[in-house]
Image: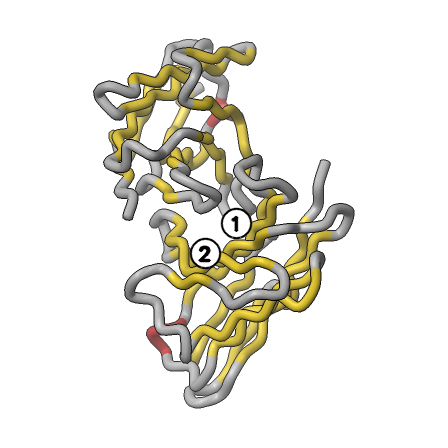
Amino acid sequence: GAVVSQHPSWVICKSGTSVKIECRSLDFQATTMFWYRQFPKQSLMLMATSNEGSKATYEQGVEKDKFLINHASLTLSTLTVTSAHPEDSSFYICSATDRGQGEQYFGPGTRLTVT
Amino acid sequence: GENVEQHPSTLSVQEGDSAVIKCTYSDSASNYFPWYKQELGKRPQLIIDIRSNVGEKKDQRIAVTLNKTAKHFSLHITETQPEDSAVYFCAASPGNQFYFGTGTSLTVIP
C-alpha cells in the first residue's frame, strides 16, 4: 500500500525557536496533503490542507503565520512551527491522498515537545 | 464547517460480543465516511469506508451503516477479539478535507 513518512519522529526544542517537520509520500504522488494535530487521548484536529504548488488552506483558528506549510512537490510537504511555545507541544500527523476524495494515508506522526 | 460527534468515548466488551460506535455529522454536503483504527503510538489505519450512495457496507467482521436523512453513521464490529482493542475514529468528508470524530477507546476483555 501507499506509504507516507514523516521526519523527525520526535523533536525537543526551546521556546522561541522554529521547528520544521517533513511529510513525504514515498511511492505515489500526493495531490493533496493534510496536517493534523492530536493531543493525548484526543481526536485528530485538521490544521490545514495543502495542494502542490499553491497556498495552504488553513482551518478556522489555526494561525497561518505560526504554522507555515509548504507543499513544494507532489511528494513533499513541510510544516514549520515558528517561535514555538510550550502550548505548541503536541503530536503532529500528516496525511496524503492521490485523488480528490479517496483514502488518506497517514504518516507515523511527529512528537513535538517545546521546553 | 463540518462538525462530527462520536459516541461513546469509551467502550468495553467481552471477547466475542459485538461493539457499536455511532457518529453524527452536520454538513449535508459530506458524502464520504471513513473509519480509522489507531493503536497507541501508531498512525491511524483505514478499516472501512462508505459513500453516501450506499446505506450499508460489510467487510468480514466489520460493517458500517449510513443514514443520510438523519446524518448519522455507525460502525459495527462482531465477534470482537482482543486485537480489536484500539481507538476508533469516524470521519466525514464534504470535499477533500476530512473532519474527525472525537474517538472511541474500545477495550475487548478476553
Q: Position of residue A43 (x, y in %)?
A: 36, 47
Element type at marker 1?
A: loop
Q: Which circle marks residue A36 in the picture?
A: 2
> What is the quadrant of residue B87 in the picture?
top left
Q: Chain of mark 1?
A: B
Amino acid, disc 2: Tyr
Q: Chain of mark 2?
A: A
Query: Which residue is at a point 77% across and 47% down the rendered structure image?
Result: A27
Element type at marker 2?
A: strand
> What is the quadrant of residue B64 in the picture?
top left
Amino acid, disc 1: Gly
Query: Is residue A105 depicted above or below A50 in this figure?
Result: above
Residue closest to the far right: A27
> What is the quadrant of residue A85 in the picture?
bottom left
Q: Nearer the viewer, mark 1 or mark 2?
A: 2
Nearer to me, A60 or B61: A60
> Callout 1: 10 Å neighbours few (<14), some, many (20+)?
few
> Callout 2: 10 Å neighbours few (<14), some, many (20+)?
some
Query: Which residue is at a point 37% across and 44% down the rendered structure image?
Result: B99
Left or right: A86, with A5 as reference point: left
Q: Which circle marks residue B41 in the picture?
A: 1
Nearer to me, A9 or B24: B24
Residue closest to the far bottom: A16
Q: Which circle marks residue A51 in the picture?
A: none
Structural distance between the alpha carbons of marks 1 and 2: 15 Å
Query: Is residue A39 depicted above or below B59 in this figure?
Result: below
Q: Are marks 1 and 2 in contact (CB under 8 Å)?
A: no
